[in-house]
Image: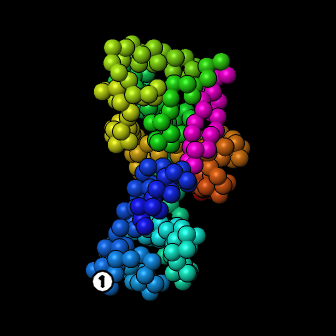
Amino acid sequence: MIGAFTEHLEKVKKYSAHTVLSYGQDLSQFVAYLEQQYELSDLNAANHLMIRSWVVSLSKEGITSRSINRKLSALNSFYKYALRNGALIKNPMKKVVAPKSGKRLPSFVSEEEIPMIMNSIDPKVGEYEQRRDAIILFLLYTTGMRRSELINMRIEDINFSRRDIRVIGKGKKERIIPTPPESMQVLREFIEVRNAHFQEKSVEGSYLLLSGKAGKMDPRTVYGIVNRYLKLAQSAEKKSPHVLRHSFATHLLNHGADINAIKELLGHANLSATQVYTHNSIERLKEIYQKFHPKA
């Protein structure tokens, strides 16, 4: 039934491939636990005590509360699916209390270090792959889009006359990100280089960013590119593509942007997901106060 559930997530719920894979792995991990501890192989036969026991074992293994909660979320989604399809009478997750996890502030690059990162690789100089890597950094920071959104971005998603970019986010939800003329020019020049580079090769679709073999970019490759350049920044605790998305939102908020506007730009379904960035701004204010106020 796990296969049917993950297919439902992919085709009906329109979850990303990464999320579908993670949910499948979490469920398979719980099945393995059931087989080892209770000689059960059917998820629908598990009760709340078994799930609690699994949570305890995960905790003893040093798994963080955040990761455990994600696994429990996968289980809860599965059991809700099973209920709707008549494979279950009641959801055992109703009697399971998720472990508390402290709110983790998003890691971001300081505004002072952004120019250093962006200037370390010029999107207007070099061969195709160098320009592509620069465009990856450029778009992640100037649009706030997710890695998956960037990888799936196509040339036709760029509207040069309106100066905006169409982004297809989670659940196939569409949003429009306005883009300044300078950015449009950078993208226009990059597309010319891209087309010239692959003019004699068979290109996979119309993806803006292509691998050296003219195929769709691999998420791990994009992660590696961003990680390499974010190592230049001391302010970011993490060095992933999502850090540039966090930086985009934090810097907008620091400069007085309306939080509802940031929510729309990021493609958040709920304002609560965006409000976490206000904590970063408050922490920044505290730092400034401590550093500059004579009575601090």
The kind of secondary structure element at disc 1 is: loop
In this view, the residue in front, 60 or 113, is 60
Q: Residue placed farthest to the front in the image? A: 86
Which amino acid does the dot numbered 1 rest on?
Glu
Q: Which residue is mark 1?
A: 39
Quadrant holding the C terminus: bottom right
Q: Is residue 201 left or right of residue 176?
A: left
Residue at 51% x, 75% y: name it: 87
Image quadrant of residue 59?
bottom left
In this view, the residue in front, 150 or 81, is 81
Image quadrant of residue 241?
top left
- How packed mark 1 is, by other alpha carbons closer than 10 Å (few <14, some 14-19, many 20 or more), is few
Q: Is residue 46 above or below residue 240?
A: below
- Total label count? 1
Give, as a single range, the part of the protein colored magenta: 162-179
Residue 79 at least partly seen: yes
Quadrant holding the N terminus: bottom left
Q: Is residue 39 left or right of residue 79?
A: left
